[in-house]
Amino acid sequence: MATFDTTRTNYGSATAASRFSAALNSVIATVVAWNDARVTRNALSGLTDRELEDIGLTRGDIDAVADSNIIR
């Protein structure tokens, strides 16, 4: 006797759901990275020139440090 399986998912809907999930994760990661840069920029801006010099930075380095992809 022949049978066929009718319990398989629709492959197109699974792909669409994974694409949506990936896009949502990308948006969330972008917002998290922007917030991390903002917090870093604000913290470094609050330091005095002397404190920045102690850690080897100048005021002009703040944006480069905040926007870098270095793991902190």
Image (tube, rainbow, N blue to C red):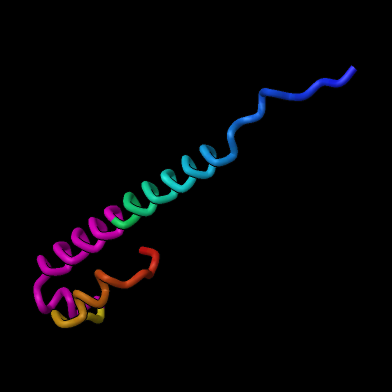
**Residue 10 location, quadrant:** top right
Which quadrant does the C terminus fall into? bottom left
What residue is at 39 percent from the left and 48 percent from the top? 25
In the rendered structure, does residue 11 fall within the stretch colored magenta? no
Q: Nearer the viewer, residue 60 or 18?
A: 18
Q: Is residue 44 above or below residue 33?
A: below
In the rendered structure, does residue 47 fall within the stretch colored magenta? yes
What residue is at 69 percent from the left and 23 percent from the top? 6
Q: Main secondary structure of the magenta part?
A: helix
What residue is at 86 percent from the left and 21 percent from the top? 2
Location of residue 69 in the rendering, given as x and y in whole percent from the top left corner: 36, 69
The range drawn in magenta is 31-55
Location of residue 33 in the rendering, given as x and y in whole percent from the top left corner: 30, 59
Location of residue 35 in the rendering, given as x and y in whole percent from the top left corner: 23, 56
Please indicate whether residue 40 sits to the left or right of residue 8 in the image: left
Location of residue 44 in the rendering, given as x and y in whole percent from the top left corner: 17, 68
